[in-house]
Image (spheres, rainbow, N blue to C red):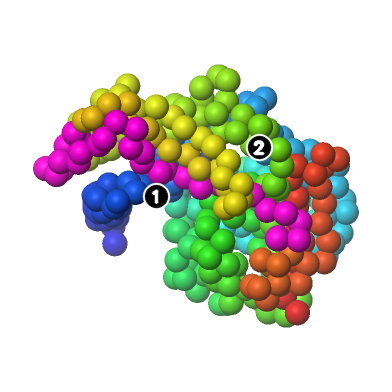
Amino acid sequence: MNMAAQQIAVVEAFEQDVLSGLSAAQKTLPCKYLYDEAGSRIFEQICDLDDYYLTRTEAQIFTEQLEDIAAKLGANVVLIEPGAGNCEKAEPLLQQMDKPSAYLPMDISPEILLAARERIEHKLPGLNVVPAVGDFTSAYIWQRLQNTSGRKVVFFPGSTIGNFTPVSALELLNLFGARLRPGDGLLLGADLVKDSIVLERAYHDSEHVTEAFNKNLLHRINRELDGSFNVDNFAHRAFYHSRRQRVEMHLVSLEEQSVDICGHTFRFDEGETIHTENSHKYTLSGLEALLNSAGFTPRQYWTDNKQHYAIFYAEIE
Ligand code: AVI
């Protein structure tokens, strides 16, 4: 498929997902659509917020435990990173690792991957960087690993696992595991269950950046699907659902209203919501159980002193 055909397929999938999501009894939009160019830029701002502890806590654990983590991964490893983006998290790890034999970042953006490859090859001369463009949740991108020899470790930081429901998180880890052999590993970053006030502040920040991130989805529908959302008629809501152990993000209709998208009309009652994201939080034992269910044996984990966040290393037996 050429670039233009690919772009058309992406817009068609977006249209289909939006039309079916907004036709459901609980209106919903898949959270992957939060990340267009504008959304990705806003997400970078979220990562710098005081209220959003996740990014800096994970970075702190990596900085403090880098030697130990790299030692645990072992020598001559092929490091695979699904959803690598600009590969900034892998770089210090690769620098610390003992003779990594290759780095395979996966991302949907070829431009970001190619720029990252140039940067990493410059900083780590001799390291084989092999980018794979595509969606890491599809089996096809993992087929490219079939010819890779040597021990592999999948690097999945950023608490991205939290944006999958427990059932789809298990499916994803099974997908990773299916491409690995006994002795291969997984280095996983995940956010932990904690005080709901801390959690809710992270997703309803005082600077309203997460609000802009959430509402950008409506702007995106207006831009790309000729939508008629009056974005000011919606409010950002984020709350911790303790039984489901997740922060839910919604957009709340502030009045009874109708919205047109691609020739379809959607009615909203006052107070009705569009569910835009789940961010699941785990206990340490919950993460261990998830890893075990997917065929991984946890070998070690590292946390911060408040136990807000955890990085797990696990291996296929
Ligand atoms: C990317 N992901 C781990 C973020 C999270 O915390 O669930 C996305 C996010 N949504 C709102 N703020 C950040």
In the image, 299: left or right of 222?
right
Q: Position of residue 291 (x, y in %)?
A: 69, 67
Compared to residue 266, the image places residue 128 above or below, namely below
Q: Earlier in the sequence, mark 1 or mark 2?
A: 1
Q: Position of residue 255 (x, y in %)?
A: 27, 26
Q: Ligand 1 sits in which quadrant?
A: top right
Q: Is residue 91 visible?
A: no
Residue at 67% over, 25% down: 50
Q: Which residues are magenta?
A: 258-287
Give the crowd class for mark 2: few <14, some 14-19, many >=20 residues within 10 Å.
some
Q: Secondary structure at mark 1?
A: loop
Compared to residue 17, the image places residue 240 above or below, namely above
Q: Is residue 67 visible?
A: yes
In the image, 126: left or right of 252?
right
What's the amino acid at mark 1?
Pro
Q: Does residue 179 belong to the magenta stretch?
A: no
Instruction: Looking at the picture, tell me which residue is in the foreground, 308 or 118.
Output: 308
Instruction: Please give the label number shown on residue 196.
Output: 2
In the image, 166: left or right of 255?
right
Residue at 85% over, 47% down: 65
Q: Determine which residue is flagged by label 1.
A: 30
Residue at 29% over, 31% down: 270
Q: Does residue 267 belong to the magenta stretch?
A: yes
- Which quadrant holds the N terminus? bottom left
Compared to residue 241, the image places residue 180 above or below, namely below
